[in-house]
Amino acid sequence: MQEMNYQQLRTRYPIFLVHRPRWQLTATELLIHFDFEIPGLASFAPRLSFPLSATSQAAGLPPEWIERLARDLALIEMISYWKCCCPPEVQLEGWQLSSDEAAWWYQVYRHGLGEFFYRNGITPEEPPLRFSNLFDAKLDAKPEPPPAIPSGLAFDRVLVPVGGGKDSAVTLERLALLPRRRLAFAINATQAALATMERAGIPPEDRILVRRHFDPALIDLNRRGFLNGHTPFSALVAFIAELAALLHGCAYVALSNEASASDATVAGSQVNHQWSKSYAFESLYREHQARSYPWPIEYFSLLRPFSELAIAREFGRHPQYHDVFLSCNLGGRANRWCGNCGKCLFVALILLPFLGPEQVKALIAPDILERQELQDAFDGLVGLKDTKPWECVGTVAEVNYALELAAKKYGWLEPEARPPALIRRWLRARTAGSLPSSSASLHPFRLQATEDHIPAAFRPAIANFLADGAAAFPDSEALLP
């Protein structure tokens, strides 16, 4: 069919129905089944599978706790399916939201789908959806107050989401400095994520590998021209990690999101590809935890005070990960860098001052700094255009600083130098004064975030973060004022 527009789809399919999720707890796993429906179009039945280790405390959890999280997981999982038509009314079958809860979810949908709306040319209503309630007479229409924490439950470990990229490797290494048991967590774990866990010394029994099963009916709708686009995946990770932490006695979920994650993708706007990694979402999620959950789990990012460039420098200190890490979304399933996307290019540029051009090319792609096909992405990364690649990348100021460091370190500023093609493009823009003047108020090798949510018990892990990087790469301080 021809691609339909937003208003046509909302008119034709005005309701998105969320049936009450079903869950089943066995000795080895927790299964959650979701049931979504767009009347007159399609039904969807995605599910999640949480493995239970020998030290899991799942059997001692009040069923109300699992039910509470299963409902929240339904509301964040449904975003992938709701967006195909954006029905204006979401009917919840069997439970209700308070006005505060509904307002919270409106924020997640509005900001988390900011890129989706922007790239589809949509100006959404405020809010873009409204919740209503459908109650089965057999179900309790009034939510019960959450039970107190049962005796015998322990919350003392730290859960670390691992995607296989450089940031989570850095977090695992910094947390190894503390006397606290680390559990590594992944959703549909890639080879890179598993290798990172192994290199970090996480034993198999401390790897929580959740399986997310997507309903292929949505892919069929996308092929037929229904709306498609980016969703706030890290918000989904937050809720899945919350339940994994609860099942396995973790008091903390330690993310690896940096200060740069709060930077807009489109200059001068609030559109941010990685909004669900931003400090704004981190704060919003913690508000939800405090209001909705009785258990003592804290959600925070250990790397929030730092820039992407400072994290890249720290990653350079840990060569045991260099041959296994992978940040490319396009090549993730095949466990390889595609070498032709904005994310591959960004990682190459941000690591260039620390690993050097030869190692960067060997790890990512031999011609990563030469490819003319990457010129548009390159221009976005260095600020020659207003939109950065639609990927999780750092700020324009960081990338330009990395290139300044690399140019000085590798002699690319000398008249007789023969740098790679994309570096030559940058040098021409630099000479012409076309690069944006840095708007960063803080140097990339200084603390970036004025606020964070790092608990006091975890601050020793990052106390010497910048000093350790400077000691390992003293020439990286060459451009300091």
Image (tube, helix red, strand yellow):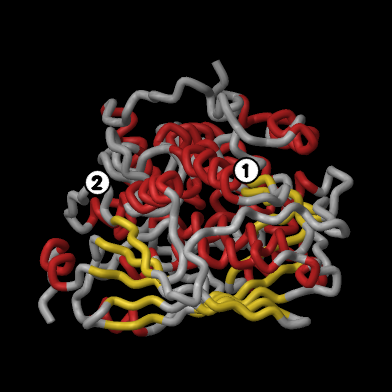
Comes first in the chain, label 1 or label 2: 2
Q: Which residue is mark 2?
A: 126
The percent coordinates of residue 451 (x first, y second) are 57, 28
Q: Nearer the viewer, residue 143 or 288?
A: 143
Name the residue at 13% across, 67% down: 11
- As drawn, is 225 to the left or to the right of 359? left
Name the residue at 46% across, 20% down: 441
Q: Nearer the viewer, residue 445 or 114?
A: 114
Amino acid residing under circle 2: Glu
- As drawn, is 354 to the left or to the right of 151? left
Q: Is residue 230 visible?
A: yes
The percent coordinates of residue 442 (x first, y second) are 51, 22
Where 343 falls versus 447 (above or below)? below
On residue 301, which mark appears? 1
Circle 2 SS class: loop
Where 1 falls versus 314 (above or below)? below
The percent coordinates of residue 49 (x first, y second) are 62, 77
Q: Is residue 420 visible?
A: no
Q: Nearer the viewer, residue 87 or 19?
A: 19
On residue 339, which mark appears? none
Name the residue at 34% across, 82% down: 43
Name the residue at 76% across, 38% down: 458
